[in-house]
Amino acid sequence: MDFITYEMFGAAGDGITDDMPAIIQAHEEANRLSLPVKAKEGAVYYIAPKNYTAIVKTSVDWTGAKFIIDDRACEKHTAALFMVLGDKEPVELEISSLHRGQTEIPNPFGKELYVVVKNANYKDYIRKGLNQNNGTARTDNFILHADGTLPSPVSFDFDEITGVHAVPVDETRLTLTGGEFTTIANQWESRYDYHARNIAVRRSNVDIGGITHLVTGELDHGAPYSGFLSISGCAHVCVHDCVFTGHKIYSTIGAAGKPVSMGSYDIGLGMCSDISLLRCSQTTDILDRGYWGLIGSNYCRDLLLEDCHFSRFDAHQGVTNCTLRRCTLGWQCLNAIGSGTFLIEETDAYGHALVNLRSDYGSTWNGTMVIRNCTWRPLGQGRAVFAGWNDATHDFGYDCYLPQNVVIDGLTILEERTDDAPLYIFNNYLGNAEISAEERKYMPIPPVSVDVKNVHTHRPVVLCEQPELMTDTVFHI
């Protein structure tokens, strides 16, 4: 026997019969025998809205099969349908402290580890605005090589570490291939009950290719989704040649007691390292403002998006090092906070700004931003390449930086406006409010250098809409 099928355990594949019990049993047997699973070409597997999870520890080929995921009355809306896990047990790695920029940590195990560190006694990402909150524990995640080196430096200072989770990276590559999945959307009240009836990857060293996710049955209300593809707590994952679908935007009352649009995602990345998305796209129009941006991320490191066609990229609670190459970004464009190097290359982007530095987390980027051979098609007036807002009155838990080194080499701006108003590299970051110097207790740290060349626009290019913020910034144009 070379592989396991769902039909061996009674799957009907007729689009009507609930096939999830057979699917669960098939994966249990495949895990026991260390055999791959293969779906039947032409089959349509119906998954009822029950509390189901299939544990996946071997490769799966869904090519030619379809799955109908009924979310209209979920028993447990947070239960993943396919949970991809490894067999590696955590190891006890002792780390007492870390400093930002550190590139080595003793590794006594002689094998590559995926590591998460936390300081529960310190809060970062103390959010401001309509979805305000009290922050989350200081956290970082990284790959630790067998020789004790890190592929990229530690992102934060950790004077104290209250928790370390370290797991050996899986040596073998697990693959998830093909399949068309259609979610019949939930009909819940519009509030923050994130649905996660999805493919959840919690194992390192995974290749995901050729999957299509569609959404049907959306009403004028519903709960948001955290991602049909959810990648978290792992490293070395490649997603390629996949098609996703944006979700309708619904509104609710936020933490500040006012209406707020709810983010709903088809790709969710959280606490993961070395993640690649290659040649992926979405079915919904990237300029349709009725659908939320496709991808959201938290606590990610070393991300690569290449040849992707998405309505938005979003680094929510920070990313360390990111590359966007030959991508197209739609109406919500590029939203980011974080550190390290962000390279945007040969990318065609819409949006009010090319890069929106998220104001709810302090509009901070502690590192370098490089824009090379890109095209920006402003929506609206297109005042500034980088847009952010931080009036320096709120403690986000960390020092806030404007990008410390900016390099723009090749930027074509295609816009309808014909006036000669300046094009600013940075907008009025501190805002126009009448705030005293005494009230501005948390002043952002301005850029060290801004290098600009080969910008194609009919407008004069000016460093900042608020020049007093950048009197010491070295500006070359």
Image (tube, rainbow, N blue to C red):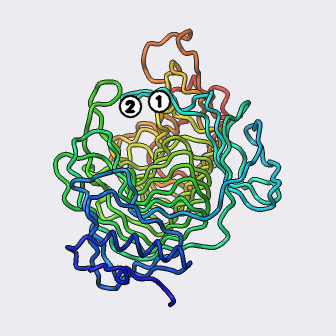
Residue at the outermost bottom position: 1
Q: Is residue 172 above or below residue 348?
A: below
Element at label 1: loop
Foreground residue among 120 and 333:
120
Q: Amino acid at mark 1?
A: Arg
Give residue 300's position: percent from left, percent from top: 57, 49
Element at label 2: loop
Q: Amino acid at mark 2?
A: Asn
Residue matched to label 1: 127
Give residue 139's position: percent from left, percent from top: 61, 39
Answer few, some or many: residues within 10 Å of disc 2's Cα (few below 14, many 20 plus, some between 14 and 19).
some
Residue matched to label 2: 131
Q: Is disc 1 in contact with disc 2, using a CB cutoff of under 8 Å? A: yes
Q: CA distance from mark 1 to mark 2?
A: 7 Å
Identify the residue at horizontal 42%, vertical 17% (top origin): 433
For residue 109, say whether it is visible: yes
Foreground residue among 34 and 148:
34
Q: Answer with left or right where residue 440 lies relative to residue 194.
A: right
Identify the residue at horizontal 32%, vertical 51% (top origin): 76
Q: Quadrant of residue 80?
A: bottom left
Q: Answer with left or right where residue 149 lies relative to residue 191.
A: right
Foreground residue among 9 and 439:
9
Q: Answer with left or right where residue 151 lies relative to residue 10.
A: right
Identify the residue at horizontal 71%, vertical 57% (top origin): 113
Give residue 9's position: percent from left, percent from top: 36, 79
Answer few, some or many: residues within 10 Å of disc 1's Cα (few below 14, many 20 plus, some between 14 and 19).
many
